[in-house]
Image (tube, rainbow, N blue to C red):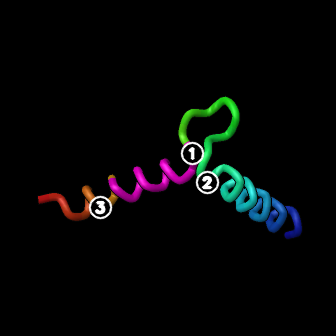
Amino acid sequence: MAEAIAKIKDGYEEARLYWNQPRPGEYVSYREIVMLSVGWMALYIFKL
């Protein structure tokens, strides 16, 4: 149980750290990934 909590905490810290700037070696920040995902979901849900 403690390992699962540690994984969640580490994931949160990583997402917070790289929210506005990408991780070294990557080109897209987590914020951009989330925004694109939300946009695609909205297009899928509200398609005409």
Of all residues, the one furthest to the right in this rendering is 2
| Marks 3 and 2 in Cβ contact (< 8 Å) | no
Residue 47 placement, left or right of 17: left
- Name the kind of residue labelled 3 in the image: Ala
- Name the kind of residue labelled 2 in the image: Trp
User: Residue at (48%, 55%) from the top-left corner?
Assistant: 34
Q: Nearer the viewer, mark 1 or mark 3?
A: 1
> Can you identify the residue that label 3 sits on?
42
Q: Is residue 30 magenta?
A: yes
Q: Is residue 43 magenta?
A: no
Q: Earlier in the sequence, mark 3 or mark 2?
A: 2
**Residue 19 at x, y percent in the picture:** 61, 54
| Marks 2 and 1 in Cβ contact (< 8 Å) | yes
* Element class at badge 2: loop
Estimate the spatial distance between the alpha carbons at disc 2 and disc 1, rounded to whole Å: 6 Å
The dot on residue 29 is 1
User: Residue at (53%, 53%) from the top-left corner?
Assistant: 31
Of all residues, the one furthest to the top in this rendering is 25
Residue 48 falls in image quadrant = bottom left
> Can you identify the residue that label 2 sits on?
19
Estimate the spatial distance between the alpha carbons at disc 1 and disc 3, rounded to whole Å: 20 Å
Read off the magenta span.
29-39
Q: Earlier in the sequence, mark 2 or mark 1?
A: 2
Residue 46 falls in image quadrant = bottom left
Estimate the spatial distance between the alpha carbons at disc 3 and disc 2, rounded to whole Å: 21 Å
